[in-house]
């Protein structure tokens, strides 16, 4: 994870680009990983751990009706989170991650381990859906790793 | 760290209280630690990693002039962060942490390892100053551990 963060670190500093992160199921793990590298304040601007639906509405401006309609763990909300945090923090990239880390919260259509990861660069927002296996902390780690992978592939 | 988070977890659920966190030097580590426990969505509402000074102003409403005057790593700003996140997230407790994790950023009056940890419960805001030794990740871990200790002692 640290190696991937270092590659992102070097890329962002070299390109003079910035990033912000809106996390739900990863709960701050992505922000923690990125800011673990000395000098990360050169590109990491803002992280929001929008754990409750109210936080997603109040801080990120995602309409409560949309969350109720699509579900907090959905492609639409991940994309909105990525786009919102990028606009709020005025960064080049915005990362949005939402999903079901478990052990509860899963259901037949969206079992535990379902995670949506979105990246917005201001021109387009892409989102990938994952189904990770394992327990809560493993799912969070896999979500963080794949978020960083997707971020790196966006440069 | 996890044991302390579990004690906080049990306390908050038992007392039906909520918490939010505004982090600077810990970069999401406190949010990540609290949300690592299954069921934490019952009390963890919002985390903000206000890494840049602009984020502290824009998201937490801390005046830029105050940050310039007191320094981002200061007792005043830690207290403002704790109070602001509690009000924004409408939680019972607000935790604010700012400091200098290094390796750069230190100076004679505030060397690397200087960390201010504040807790607001709506009636009062307390702040403790620490000087941690070690490298960046160790300083962040110590800051997280002492933040959780201070939070637990506030119940």
Image: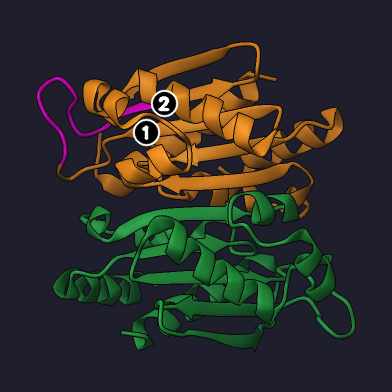
Chain colours: A orange, B green
**In-front residue for pair B44/A155:** B44
A88, above or below A124, in the image: below
Q: Secondary structure at mark 1?
A: strand
Magenta span contains residue A129: no
**In-front residue for pair A47/A67:** A67
Q: In this picture, which residue range is highlighted in magenta? A: A105-116
The chain carrying label 2 is A
Q: State the image coordinates of residue A95 (x, y, percent, origin top left).
A: 54, 31
Asked whether the residues under the numbered discs 2 and 1 touch, taking CB atoms below 8 Å apart as contact, a structural biologist would say: yes
Do we see residue B11 in this rendering?
A: yes
- In the image, which disc is placed on residue A98? 1
Magenta span contains residue A114: yes
Q: Residues within 10 Å of mark 1 (few under 14, many from 20)?
A: many
Q: Residues within 10 Å of mark 2 (few under 14, many from 20)?
A: many
Q: To which residue does mark 2 refer?
A: A78
- Which residue: 78% across, 31% down? A17
């Amino acid at each position: 994870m640290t190696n991937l963060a270092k590659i992102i670190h070097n890329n962002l500093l070299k390109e003079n680009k910035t990033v912000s992160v809106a996390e739900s199921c990863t709960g701050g793990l992505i922000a923690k990983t990125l800011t673990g590298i000395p000098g990360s304040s050169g590109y990491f601007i803002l992280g929001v751990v929008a754990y409750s639906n109210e936080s997603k509405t109040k801080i990120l401006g995602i309409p409560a009706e949309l969350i109720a309609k699509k579900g907090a763990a959905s492609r639409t909300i991940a994309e909105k989170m990525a786009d919102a945090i990028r606009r709020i923090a005025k960064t080049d990239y915005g990362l949005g991650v939402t999903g079901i880390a478990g052990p509860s919260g899963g259901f037949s259509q969206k079992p535990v381990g379902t995670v949506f990861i979105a990246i917005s660069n201001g021109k387009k927002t892409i989102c990938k859906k994952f189904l990770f296996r394992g327990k809560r902390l493993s799912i969070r780690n896999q979500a963080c790793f794949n978020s960083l992978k997707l971020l790196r592939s966006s440069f």
